[in-house]
Amino acid sequence: MAKEIELPIYGVNPEIARERLASVGAKLVGRHQFRRVNFQVRKPIEDASGEYYTKWIRVRTDGAKSTITLKEQKGKGIEGRLEYEVEVSDFEQAVKIVHRLMPEAEFDYFENYREEYSLGEFTIELDKFPMLEYSMEIEGPSEEMVNELYARINVGGSIEGNKSIPTDEYYRIHGADYSKLQESYSDIIASLLAD
């Protein structure tokens, strides 16, 4: 298990981001075209005390490396996420296994482009999701440190309060209709889930 401390930022200009990352010495360590399926284990809830909780499983591949990741979000802060991840040898079979274990679970499929940068103890990811603006995640050892790096690189955009929500809701918040994206992926989804 690892605690995932990351600051999500939405609406980043990619050219400015690349320039600012280079200016502080961040190194590009990879470009990835991801395919992923997210299975909702526990829909987001707030209990009587207002405590937020959600849990989901992500199966993801970049064509070379595939993983299954269980993610839990406790509270809405950036230090409230736990992550359990294991590498698997076959993306399609991993999707089928999780789907058969949880046939009633809601799920979504999508693809995205990512540039991954490294800077000391930090990992910085510049993401492009279909129909949305570029976003960035800064992951590091503490909330204070990731906030300091964000201020230092000054890439603009807006800090997202809570990114641990279902994909369709995330798209809706940013003014995009996720159902149209899912329609475009319908043949891929059918192929992934076929026996």
Image (cartoon, rainbow, N blue to C red):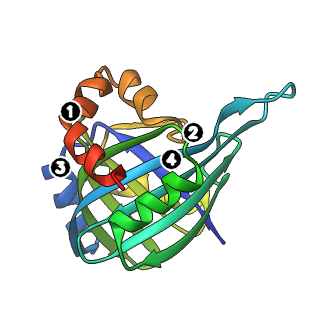
Task: Give the mark, 3 or 1, whose residue is nearer the N terminus.
Answer: 3
Q: Amino acid at mark 1?
A: Met
Q: CA distance from mark 1 to mark 2?
A: 28 Å
What is the crowding at mark 3: few (fewer than 14 residues within 10 Å), some, or many (at least 20)?
A: some
Q: Amino acid at mark 4?
A: Phe
| Residue named by callout 1 | 131
Task: Give the mark, 4 or 1, whose residue is nearer the N terminus.
Answer: 4
Task: Give the mark, 3 or 4, whose residue is nearer the N terminus.
Answer: 3
- Which quadrant, please, contains the N terminus? bottom right
Q: CA distance from mark 4 to mark 1?
A: 21 Å
Q: Amino acid at mark 3?
A: Pro
- Which quadrant, please, contains the C terminus? bottom left
| Residue named by callout 4 | 39
Q: Position of residue 175 (x, y in %)?
A: 31, 20
| Residue named by callout 3 | 14
Foreground mark, 4 or 1?
4
Q: Is residue 147 visible?
A: no
